[in-house]
Image (cartoon, rainbow, N blue to C red):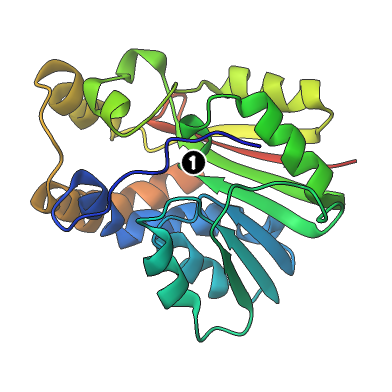
């Protein structure tokens, strides 16, 4: 079984609530993976369903959203209750009984919470159909690791090379990685590493409305050499 730190209280006003309001940012992430979802998707660590709702907008036929947290799961289940294409599961993601089941397995801001990330991605490989895709979005750059990372249960931050190497060693092919959100490096470093402050609604909202739309257009044309996050697309042979 996977072990995660996703069992975090979900209370209004926490940092997790503030980050969940970044709708432009989340849509940017989901759209980056859109060509690879297929029709049957496993979302691991679905939280309160923010990403789940964006995934359902892509036209998939089946979404199975896994969330082990007893605090977050009721919100997720309520959001997906009336969606016939979606199923919420209050458990860790396991391949048992789901071998070769999914066109894609999605981890968006989740893998960094899992202590044994190698075993987790091996589970995903077993659950994917041949030709299916692993889709991962994680925080990047070890020198950005902060007290805030520790408080919300991050075991690590990644690099493009390190994440790609992990996927290839497990047997994934056609592995592609790229950095994401180059501008976000500076405010993250200043706020969390230097000043050790907490994120609030105002700062998240301003960044999401003013910075994300033009940054998205720029990074579509010019892939950044470094970024606050890194995404991976890999295929099961």
Residue shown at the point (13%, 35%) measured from the top left: 198
Left or right, residue 194 beside residue 223: left
Question: Callout 1 environment at 10 Å: few (<14), some (14 to 19), or many (20+)?
Answer: many
Left or right, residue 174 beside residue 48: right
In the displayed structure, would residue 28 be above or below residue 87? above
For numbered disc 1, what is the local secondary structure? loop
Residue shown at the point (56%, 45%) measured from the top left: 107
**Considering the image in quadrants, where does the C terminus appear?**
top right
Query: Where residue 183 appears, x then y in whole percent?
Result: 29, 34
In the displayed structure, would residue 105 be above or below residue 170? below
Residue that extends furthest to the front in the rendered view of this protein: 70
Left or right, residue 108 beside residue 176: left
Query: Where residue 172 appears, x then y in whole percent?
Result: 81, 33
**Considering the image in quadrants, where does the N terminus appear?**
top right
Q: Is residue 235 visible?
A: no
Pointer 1 residue: 110
């Amino acid at each position: 079984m996977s072990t995660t730190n996703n069992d975090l209280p979900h209370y209004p006003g926490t940092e997790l609530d503030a980050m969940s309001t970044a709708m432009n940012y989340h849509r940017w992430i989901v759209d980056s993976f859109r060509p690879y979802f297929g029709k049957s998707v496993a979302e691991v660590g679905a939280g309160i369903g923010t990403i789940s709702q964006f995934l359902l907008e892509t036209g998939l036929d089946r979404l199975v959203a896994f969330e082990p947290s007893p605090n977050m799961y009721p919100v997720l289940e309520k959001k997906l209750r009336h969606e016939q294409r979606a199923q919420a599961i209050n458990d860790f993601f396991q391949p048992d009984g789901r071998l070769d089941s999914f066109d894609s397995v999605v981890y968006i801001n989740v893998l960094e919470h899992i202590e044994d990330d190698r075993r987790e991605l091996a589970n995903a490989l077993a659950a994917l159909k041949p030709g299916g895709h692993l889709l991962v979005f994680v925080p990047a750059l070890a020198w950005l690791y902060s007290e805030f990372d520790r408080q919300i249960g991050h075991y690590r931050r990644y690099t493009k090379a390190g994440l790609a190497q992990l996927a290839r060693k497990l047997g994934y092919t056609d592995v592609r990685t790229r950095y994401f959100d180059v501008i976000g490096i500076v405010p993250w470093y200043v706020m969390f590493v230097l000043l050790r402050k907490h994120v609030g609604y105002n700062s998240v909202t301003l960044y999401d409305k003013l910075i994300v739309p033009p940054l998205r257009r720029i990074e579509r044309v010019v892939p950044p050499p470094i970024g606050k996050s890194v995404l991976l697309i890999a295929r099961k042979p």
